[in-house]
Amino acid sequence: TVVVVGSVNIDLVVRTPLIAPPGHTVIATGSSTGSGGKGGNQAAAVARLGGACRLIAAVGPDFDPSSLPGVDLSLVRVTAEPTGLAVVMLDSIGENAITVVPGANALLAPADLGPFTGPPGVLLASLEVPLPAVLAAARAARAAGWTVVLNPAPAHSLPDSLLADVDVLVPNEHELAALGDPDDLLATGVGAVVVTLGAAGCRINRPGDVRSVPAHPVRAVDTTGAGDAFCGALAWALDTGRDLDTAVRLAVVAGALATRAVGARAALATAAEITAAGIT
Ligand code: ADP
């Protein structure tokens, strides 16, 4: 099982010729709403691959369970606060400016975590929820023999006590800059640092060993959620018993395929599509 601890948001995407600077008004060309949040997106990626997935999150009364088919939502707590909201301004050249209203996500607490029982699986956590919940999840999962994958997004520095409980840390370049040098991170006890590099693929850092993994070629339409698809696929592959190198090669394909359509969950990869790309 993959247990995902993270945010659930509603994404309000506003398409506009240009993103209004402070004090200015612009007329947008259109808008759409979709399901998002790093936790929700990562859980959706695992379920799409056919993996068993449980999401631990806090949402509002407006949450729609049908937005996460195939995901065990028994530990999603419905609070009186509204579901988190991400307002995404998207301009005509694909640049974006995003403001996130945490809403119910801010209420996620250590008490929301169920026990990590049964055969050891993989914990996948990200940082759009309060740090105490992430710390408690990593500690409990590690103590139960689970593999801990942390996507340190959005960018945030982290206490060494958390890093010591992490098996695989998955930052993008921007998030890595907030964390420091991979060698320093490895020295705190992190097992491996997998840095995602967008269209350049990723880099796996292990003690005394750095290797690059090229991207899977794709005609990218929208890279929103590529990182979430990558993380979900990595966690799923580790949960199926694959080693880290194989799991990363598989995640690189999943990240690329997720860019095929507009929206974070519009083009998530199936296991068959990954097999078709030659990765087993
Ligand atoms: P984030 O979405 O968190 O910023 P990245 O942009 O680094 O993360 O994307 C995550 C992964 O998705 C990359 O490591 C790569 O494997 C894949 N990916 C992202 N953008 C592309 C692209 N344009 N072409 C091919 N693969 C991509």
Image (spheres, rainbow, N blue to C red):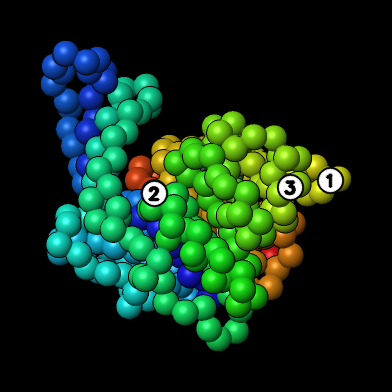
Q: Nearer the viewer, residue 142 or 120?
A: 142
Q: Nearer the viewer, residue 80 or 240?
A: 80
List the residue tagged with mark 1. 209
Relative to 254, is 16 on the left or the right? left
The CA distance from mark 3 to mark 2 is 23 Å
The CA distance from mark 2 to mark 1 is 30 Å
**Neighbourhood count class around disc 1 (C-alpha, 10 Å): few under 14, some 14–19, many 20 upward:** few
Is label 3's Cβ within 8 Å of ligand 1?
Answer: no
List the residue tagged with mark 3. 186
Q: Nearer the viewer, residue 264 or 208?
A: 208
Figure quarter occupied by ligand 1:
top right
Q: Look at discs 2 and 1 and give the one toward the viewer.
A: 2
| Residue 6 in the image, given as x and y percentages of width and height | 40, 58
Of mark 2 and mark 1, the one earlier in the sequence is 2
Of mark 1 and mark 3, the one earlier in the sequence is 3
| Residue 10 in the image, given as x and y percentages of width and height | 24, 50
Q: Specify the quadrant of the image occupied by residue 217.
A: top right
The mark found on residue 128 in the picture is: 2
The CA distance from mark 1 to mark 3 is 11 Å
**Callout 2: helix, strand or loop?**
loop
Q: Amino acid at mark 3?
A: Leu
**Callout 1: helix, strand or loop?**
strand
Q: Look at discs 1 and 3 and give the one toward the viewer.
A: 3
248 over 64 or under it: above or below: above
**Neighbourhood count class around disc 3 (C-alpha, 10 Å): few under 14, some 14–19, many 20 upward:** many
Is label 1's Cβ within 8 Å of ligand 1?
Answer: no
**Callout 3: helix, strand or loop?**
helix
**Residue in view at x 59 percent, y 37 percent:** 179
